Amino acid sequence: MREDRSPILELQGITKSFGGVEALRGVDFALSPGEIHGLVGENGAGKSTLMKIIAGVHTEFSGRFLIDGQETHFRSARDAHSAGIAMVHQELSVAPDLTVAENVFLGNQPTNRLGLVQWRRMAREAGEQLARFGIDVDPMSRLGDLPIGLQQLIEIARVLFSGARIVILDEPTSALSPPEVERLFATLRRLREEGTAIVFISHFIEDILRVSDTVTVFRNGRKVAETASAATSKGALIEAMIGRGGEALEHSYSDDLMLPQPSDSSVVLKVNQLSLARSLKDISFEARAGEVLGIYGFMGCGQQELSRILFGKLKPDGGTLAVEGKPKTFASTAAARRAGVALVPESRRAMLFHQEPVYKNISISILDRISALLLKPAQERDIAKRQVEQLQIRPPVVGLDLGMLSGGNQQKVALAKWLTYPPKLLVLCEPTRGMDVGAKNDVINIVRDLRAKGLAIIVLSTEPETVLSLADRILVLKRGALVREFTNEPVSKDRLLEAA
Amino acid sequence: MASSDTALAAGQRARGLAPFLRSQMRNIAPFLTLIFLSGFFALASPSFATLDNLGNILTQVSVTGIIAVGLTFVILCAEIDLSIASIANVTGIAVAYFTLQESYVNIPNIPLPGAAAILLAILLCALLGLVNALGLTVIGIPSFIMTLAMMQIAAGISALLVRGQIAYKVPGVITTLGSGSIGGIPWIVIVAAIMLLGGHLVLTYTRFGRYVYMVGGNREAAEYSGLNVKLILGAVMVISAVCSGIGGMLGVAHFGSAQQNEFDTYLLDSIAAVVVGGTSLFGGRGGIGNTIVGLFVLGVLNNGLDHVNIDSFLKILIRGLILLAALVINVYAQRLREKAVE
């Protein structure tokens, strides 16, 4: 299809580096009108960087950038917008307190000569646009009252109908239900007929294969493959994404790894039929003492919600939790902590006090164990010193403000908070994200030590390596449902990706 | 392990004096303001820098000081309490309401023994604080709005109790603490000093005090550390109301009367004392020490302006400008500190 049309967008030899690290290395990329172009690759492979260059977010890079055959250089996202390029980011960027119509027309509401907003016209046109998309909602209802998937569809609809010639969709289907995905795909196909060029980034390879004409695979900042979708398969794409051979410095987990026999130690946590609105559906599993349970899934698969429910931060709509056989409904995080559950969330900022010294950060969760009324700062410091030594936190100065530590060391402090009086169940979200190899290995060793001490540990991650390096048993979470359990069998990165 | 602490000190020295001073801006600026104001008034008026006048200043800031103790807890948690003056007023009126008045006071009140009157008054302010606490934590009304409503509710109760009249009598012990003195030192100054000291000890040396700072420093992190954030926020609202109530009772004894709108200026004064002293409006930084400096800045300013020949209407404007300057410093100090840490 693309041979007979000249490309609307052409990139040649694009190289982009962030502080000396090359995120893109000599990438060529072309997009034709009436084409849906799928983009796959692991986190950090360079997909998003390339798209941000196209959308005018990153303006510093080397290489040639042509639109309609004309060499162009965007200075801002606004330039890209006026050139007819629009992007839907993975995170929702809607105004939940405004009406559906206002969201559809955000930034260019129809006005009369006095500059007053023409509400009736806006509502009518918004309704018509959404109807073309198969969405039937009252344009004057508050957007935030609608389900998340519908909000996402409305945001996508806004961009698709903004008149853009090039539309970039980053992970558009992760929050959508299957019928909503169908609606989205029908609209994408119709826009393709009308000559719009669409870039579709997704971890869901099936979705890519179903809707796109061409697929490009990225790995380590390079384009490693570009094929017609009809001529490839999920397995082939996964293989291209991960790569075979010694290119990666780290253990690549591309070969099969044998998971151990299921543990028969005591059940620490029993989760039964847990559900939460659109995020989680009928989740049931057990976590056992001395076992690391890995839960793998793509971004937005419900991992975050699950971890928050286990720690009493979110209340489930249905289902039960039992800790060591006793049913629990956590009214607060304090209740969860008292029941012996600990959580390290994916964001360090969410659990650390950057302007307080390290020792106060370490002692905060156990203060009630070491002091009834009066603080015992000397004891706090001793405890902190022991943790700092054991976890090799650098610099080993417990009086230093936490904000002075590097990210990896901060992550260790976040773990250290829970280790003086170990909990029964430790829930870790993305425990090694953004760490260098050394810090990653440290964390892996800490987790293994804790397992040996008999803790039940749950590791939730969107990175297959993290789960594979830590877990004894692996559950795969897909769009809020558990779809696969790996136990006592060989597992590898492609098998995980295949299941998710 | 003294070595690591020395290393820390060395590290801070190596980073230089300027960043250290910048990170301490919130404590230094109020002190400089105080020294500057004191110096200015001492030069401008011979009657300012006297021991007698120091006693005046201390007495003048005592009621504000008592109220500001509780408010410091609230602001450290990054919340606000706008009902402090109203609660002080209603508690002062309540304690008079339960005391036998002279026959010419035309209020249909309920005379009780002094201890009962004091107990009921304290219960009343604690209850109002509890309503603030429940509104903030259980229902989720922002403290700014919740305590605005409480300001009106407490004023309403005051109005119903005194019905436009003035009561004069309060229980004997309150009269002594509010207007008596011992060895030349007014009791009210001693009470204020004890309460400020108590507040400082609680904030610095107790587990609860640590929780207050941590909740104020990063509420989300406090929750992810398994603290009962709502309980802590609720507690500071009750503490604030009870401190206000005590300030109100002693204030009524100090002024010699209990009537509607008697404490209106104390809302702004108390907030000003806490914030001028350098306690961060964003929570987690500051303390009673800062509040004491703030009280002195305010006290010196109010008192000093009386000693110099200045248009009394202009005084109001000057106080407003000083408060604005303090707010600017407060916000900048926060930014400087964040920069020093990151």
Image (tube, rainbow, N blue to C red):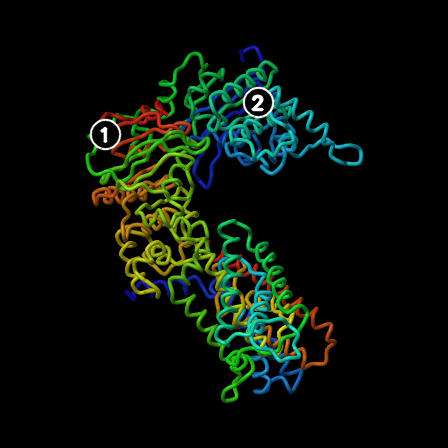
Whether residue B302 is visible: yes
Which amino acid does the dot numbered 1 rest on? Leu
What residue appears at the point 42 percent right and 40 percent down from the top-left corner? A315
Q: Is residue A259 left or right of residue B108?
A: left
Kind of residue indicated by mark 2: Leu
Q: Position of residue A29 (x, y in %)?
A: 51, 23
Check disc 2 and report the residue beneath it. Answer: A9
Element under disc 1: loop
Label 2 Cα crowd, 10 Å radius (few <14 / some 14-19 / many 20+): many
Residue nearest the viewer, comparing A394 with A142: A142
Front tag of 2 and 1: 1
Instruction: Point out residue A122 in the picture as x, y percentages from the top left corner.
Output: 70, 29
What residue is drawn where x is 41% and y is 44%? A313
Q: Is residue A422 left or right of residue B332?
A: left
The x and y percentages for residue B54 are 57, 83
Instruction: Name which of mark 2 and mark 1 comes first in the sequence.
Output: 2
What x and y, as percent, mark residue A270? 29, 36
Number of numbered discs on residues: 2
How far is disc 2 from disc 1 in space, using C-alphas? 47 Å
Q: Which label belongs to residue A259?
A: 1
Label 1 lies in what chain?
A
* In this rendering, position of residue B32 left or right of residue A407: right
Q: Quadrant of residue A485?
A: top left
Answer few, some or many: residues within 10 Å of disc 1's Cα (few below 14, many 20 plus, some between 14 and 19).
some
* Direction bottom: furthest residue: B183
A305 or A494, nearer to the observer = A305
Toward which corner of the image does residue A165 lie, by quadrant?
top right
Left or right: residue A15 compared with residue B102: left
* Quarter occupied by the C terminus of chain A: top left
Question: Which mark, residue A141?
Answer: none
Q: In the rendered view, would you say B132 is above or below A466? A: below
